[in-house]
Image (tube, helix red, strand yellow):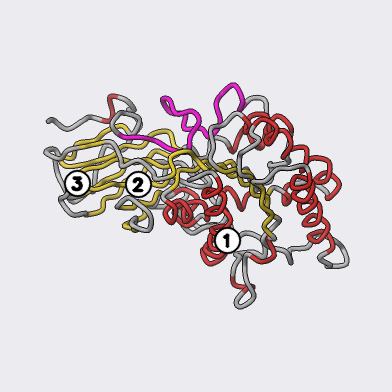
Amino acid sequence: MSQYDITKDDPNFITNSDLPVKNVRWINCQRPPIEIFGLAHCQGDEFWRMPPGVKDTVNAGVSGLATHTAGARIRFRTDSPYVALRVKLLYTDSMSHMPLTGKSGCDIYLGAGKNKIFYKKTAIPASVDTEAYEAICCKRPVMEDVTVNLPLYNGVKAVYIGISNDAELQSPTPYTVSVPIVYYGSSITQGGCASRPGNSYQAILSRWLDADYINLGFSGSARGEENMAHYIKGLNMSVFVYDYDHNAPTAEHLEKTHEKFFRIIAEANPNLPVIMASRCDFESVSLPDNSTKDSEKCREIIRRTYENAKADGYKNVWFVDGQTFFGTRGRDSCTVDGCHPNDLGFMRMAEGFYPYIKEALNSIGG
């Protein structure tokens, strides 16, 4: 089979390859049998977490961040002795507290099944000014699954998968939990500030549970608005997890929206397992007297939603105290800035969520 010329689709793409192999067969990631997970809309150069009709009805922050590919994965099977990537980014910018590997990089994992997926390589832009980049990793020349985790705080315009000319390409092994777990929340939910996409807590849990998921984390913009709840209630999901209190402007705003948000989703999906959590960085303060009263008040608002739901007969609901996520030993080593988790913080969040999500899945025979 002849080499595919990317420039036919995108004349602005990379044309000079530094890859240590020749005759690479390049395939647009949007073409079968390659499958894309975690996106609601993927067409042309639009890789979006929300569909166009909904994206235009939410607040400006959510609308813009919906173009970020947090939680998006490209999956396939191949017996190629290597896998190459060519990625064209949506933005060229930087963040002071998040590495470029996590913001704009892509992770490559091999394998399929619970705890059988292992990390292989991160494809990294050369600099913050890099618009497009490529990478390659070697693998065994046997048929095996490949998962590519897309950037957390950037979008992509195109992704091409490179394999050897004589290699086979097949559909990926289905997830054990094929109905996605849906997460809604703040910048922490979006993945700030993991060092690479595969280290967000949802990605970790996905590998542990072999579960599909959708990341609806929107940095600074998840405010528990009714139109977001109405959108989420219509999604096909196995479990719903939400923890947006960081983005509620005040505790009063959280009180007005948190239970209402739950009711909109639960009334449309009465048997859906719902996990509600409070903020993980409990010591992060916003009050002049440097107290934790705000965190305590928000936690009690969330707990009250849970208690009211249980009292009204909702069986599949759980409350997770975010203060417990970072543990006690080394707690101050879990963030990059006192708020956003680093890789240690995300690992501990995954460990904290795991028993609740596993119990939630078991409650519906997952």
Please rate how many residues cluster around mark 3, counting C-alpha atoms within 10 Å: few if below 14, some from 14 to 19, many from 20: some
Can the viewer see residue 334 in this picture? yes
Whole-number angstrom distance, CA of label 1 to CA of label 2 = 22 Å
Whole-number angstrom distance, CA of label 3 to CA of label 2 = 13 Å
Mark toward the start of the polypeptide (1 vs 2): 2
Task: Kindly check if marks 3 and 2 are in contact, taking CB atoms under 8 A apart as contact.
Answer: no
Q: Which residue is mark 2?
A: 147
Q: At which x and y percent is residue 86?
A: 32, 41
Q: The disc labelled 3 sits on which kind of residue? A: Met
Residue at (66%, 30%) from the top-left corner?
Answer: 268
Give left or right: position of 270 versus 152.
right
Residue at (48%, 34%) from the top-left corner?
Answer: 39
Q: At which x and y percent is residue 238?
A: 53, 40
Task: Kindly check if marks 1 and 2 are in contact, taking CB atoms under 8 A apart as contact.
Answer: no
As drawn, 205 above or below 185: below
Q: Which residue is mark 3?
A: 143
Q: Nearer the viewer, residue 134 or 213?
A: 213
Please rate how many residues cluster around mark 1, counting C-alpha atoms within 10 Å: few if below 14, some from 14 to 19, many from 20: many
Q: At which x and y percent is residue 227?
A: 70, 29
Q: Nearer the viewer, residue 24 or 139?
A: 139
Q: The disc labelled 2 sits on which kind of residue? A: Thr
Q: Nearer the viewer, mark 3 or mark 2?
A: 3
Residue at (51%, 32%) from the top-left corner?
Answer: 48
**Residue 75 - label:** none
Whole-number angstrom distance, CA of label 1 to CA of label 3 = 33 Å
Residue at (24%, 48%) from the top-left corner?
Answer: 144
Query: Range of the magenta residues?
Result: 34-55
Residue, far bottom? 329
Give left or right: position of 180 versus 296.
left
Mark toward the start of the polypeptide (1 vs 3): 3
